[in-house]
Image (spheres, rainbow, N blue to C red):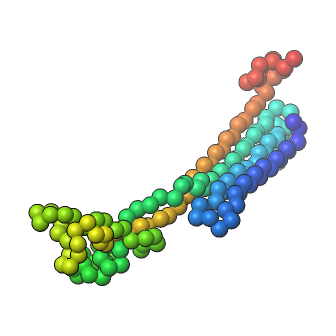
Amino acid sequence: MKQFDPKLLVIRRQSRTDGARVRPLRQNDFGGTLGGPVTLPKLYNGRDRTFFFFSYEGLRLTQPKAATTQYVPNTTLRQTAAIPLQPILNAFPLQNGKEELVPCPQGPTSTYPCPTGVAFGSLVESGLADFIQSYSLPSRIDSTSLRGDHTFGPAASPRGPRP
């Protein structure tokens, strides 16, 4: 290789979701290489003896994950909670799913008795609601390399004698 030899690489992959709640896969792989003789004008001409090779590759990858359901405080609980607790409850995301209903516990000795006028076993608000969200795991990789070769003579080089 007695002249510069540049190469470029670009690969892009992207999935389509058609309005689904799943975030798309995005993969961008790109980079390039450059190699050639080492020459320093008026100082050194390594045209047949000294060479360099440089490469770079970058990867940007966003992988979708399946939707997860978490329980968050519902609107009623946020509004009726004691004033000091409201900032804590409001730190959770807002519900985007259904209210979670639980059966009213039976028996007068239960820890959470039924509200007044509600029959035992009836479904009542739990104070929680569904929060459904899909998310992506982004990653970033950057890789570089630099190499130099020099031939000291016909029989002595880092790669061994040339045939």
Tell me the quarter of the image containing the N terminus. Answer: top right
Would residue 3 be visible to someone looking at this image?
A: yes
Tell me the quarter of the image containing the C terminus. Answer: top right
Query: What is the count of numbered marks?
Result: 0
Would residue 24 be found to the left or right of residue 52 on screen? left
Horizontal and vertical percent position of residue 140: 59, 52
Residue at figure coordinates x 18%, y 78% from the top left: 116
Question: Residue lying furthest left in this view?
Answer: 109
Residue at figure coordinates x 79%, y 36% from the top left: 51
Residue at figure coordinates x 81%, y 23% from the top left: 153
139 shown above or below 88: above
Would residue 111 be found to the left or right of residue 100 on screen? left
Residue at figure coordinates x 54%, y 55% from the top left: 66
Horizontal and vertical percent position of residue 15: 70, 57
Would residue 40 be visible to someone looking at this image?
A: no
Horizontal and vertical percent position of residue 134: 53, 61
